[in-house]
């Protein structure tokens, strides 16, 4: 019983920051290459729990990144990182509009492991 209570406390103490970034491409092939590289490099960063790259089925050339960070601090550090700046710079001329970026609270967004 004490073991279960400790496990429940550990789960409830997890701070999770979720970020979505939606991109509409002017040059889909080039943008996809930039985003794919960004995903691979971001997955190796401290505090990154997961990042997925999704392509819209209903809006060709629209891509969505879904990021899960261990904490708000880890997410903010990433947004200030050289990797984030490199990705943003590489998107110059590849987007049809500015990206739509949103920060989410994840009350039930836990890993399945």
Image (cartoon, grey):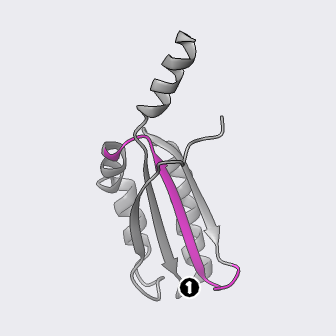
Is residue 56 left or right of 6 when viewed as pictured? right
The answer to whether residue 71 is left or right of residue 49 is left
Q: Quadrant of the C terminus?
A: top right
Is 5 rendered above or below residue 113? above
Q: Nearer the viewer, residue 66 or 7?
A: 7
In terms of image quadrants, where is residue 29? Answer: bottom right
Front position in the image: 65 or 29 = 65
User: What range is drawn magenta here?
Assistant: 57-72
For image coordinates 45% across by 25% down, the residue present is: 9
Residue 7: give x, y in percent of width and height. Answer: 53, 21
Single out the residue that lies furthest toward the top.
2
Percent across and percent down for residue 4 are: 57, 18
Q: Is residue 41 above or below residue 35?
A: above
Asked whether 113 falls inside the magenta stretch, the response is: no
Question: Which residue lies most toward the right here?
Answer: 57
Q: Residue at x 38, y 69 (%)?
A: 88
At a point 63% along the width and 67% down the height, the residue shown is: 54
Q: Is residue 66 magenta?
A: yes
């Amino acid at each position: 019983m004490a073991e279960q209570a400790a496990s429940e406390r550990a789960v409830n103490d997890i701070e999770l920051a979720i970020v979505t970034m939606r991109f509409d491409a002017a040059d889909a092939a080039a943008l996809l290459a930039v985003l794919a590289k960004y995903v691979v490099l971001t997955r190796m960063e401290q505090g990154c729990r997961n990042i997925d790259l999704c392509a819209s089925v209903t809006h060709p050339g629209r891509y969505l990144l879904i990021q899960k960070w261990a904490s708000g601090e880890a997410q903010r550090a990433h947004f200030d990182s050289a990797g984030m700046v490199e990705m943003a710079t590489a998107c110059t001329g590849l987007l049809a509009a500015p990206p739509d970026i949103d920060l989410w609270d994840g009350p039930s967004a836990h890993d399945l492991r």
